[in-house]
Image (tube, helix red, strand yellow):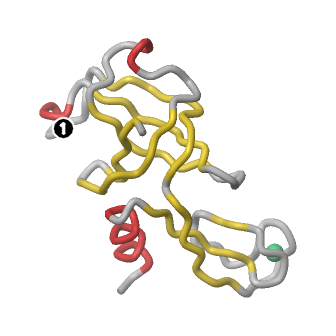
């Protein structure tokens, strides 16, 4: 299974695949060659719960071609619980800022052609 397939499989379980430095335990979302914190080259997979709070988002009212069926939706940046990591994903049914105050609790619920799918908790 490739890293991308594993990432998708974990998202479908509501989880986030990260890469943990075996030396300093710094977490990375992307598959890096050197630890951003200490420069070490050793990593192991660390699976996190895909829960957190909404840090910021953009409401998509004019979607890319082929994505019209999803509107309105939001491109959301989620601050993951207990980490310094932020992931981005898509949330359905968001048409005005009052639908999604910053700080709203949310979680990963799946993965589709857009990417990671989020839902309010
Ligand atoms: Zn490190």
Q: Is residue 86 left or right of residue 116?
A: right
Position of residue 29 in the picture relative to residue 71 (left or right): right
Give the image quarter of residue 5. Answer: bottom left
Location of mark 1 (residue)? 67
Towards the viewer: 117 or 5: 117
Give percent across and percent down for residue 42.
73, 87
Q: How many marks?
A: 1
Pick whichever, 117 or 13, lies toward us: 13
Above-or-below relation of 12 to 38? above
Judge the density around disc 1: few (<14), some (14-19), many (≥20) Cα neighbours within 10 Å.
few
Question: What residue appears at the point 45 percent right and 63 percent down from the top-left corner?
Answer: 15
Q: With respect to residue 105, does 24 lie above or below? A: below
Along the line of sight, which residue is nearer the eye, 103 or 17? 103
| Residue plotted at (51% across, 20% down) | 101
Give the structural element (helix, strand or loop) at label 1. loop
Horizontally, is 47 left or right of 121 in the view?
right
Ligand 1 quarter of the rendering: bottom right
Residue 39 x %, y %: 83, 76
Q: Quadrant of the N terminus?
A: bottom left
Residue appearing at x 68%, y 75% in the figure:
20
Report the quarter where the C terminus lies: top left
């Amino acid at each position: 299974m490739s890293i991308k397939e594993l990432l998708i499989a974990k998202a479908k379980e509501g989880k986030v695949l990260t890469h943990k430095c075996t030396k300093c335990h710094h977490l990375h979302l992307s598959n890096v060659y050197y630890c951003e914190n200490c420069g070490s080259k050793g990593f192991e997979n660390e699976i996190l719960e895909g829960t957190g709070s909404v840090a910021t988002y953009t409401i998509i009212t004019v979607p890319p071609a082929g994505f019209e069926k999803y509107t309105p939706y939001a491109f959301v940046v989620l601050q993951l619980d207990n980490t310094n990591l932020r992931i981005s994903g898509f949330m359905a049914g968001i048409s005005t800022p009052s639908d999604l105050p910053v700080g709203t609790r949310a979680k990963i619920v799946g993965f589709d052609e857009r990417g990671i799918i989020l839902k309010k908790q």
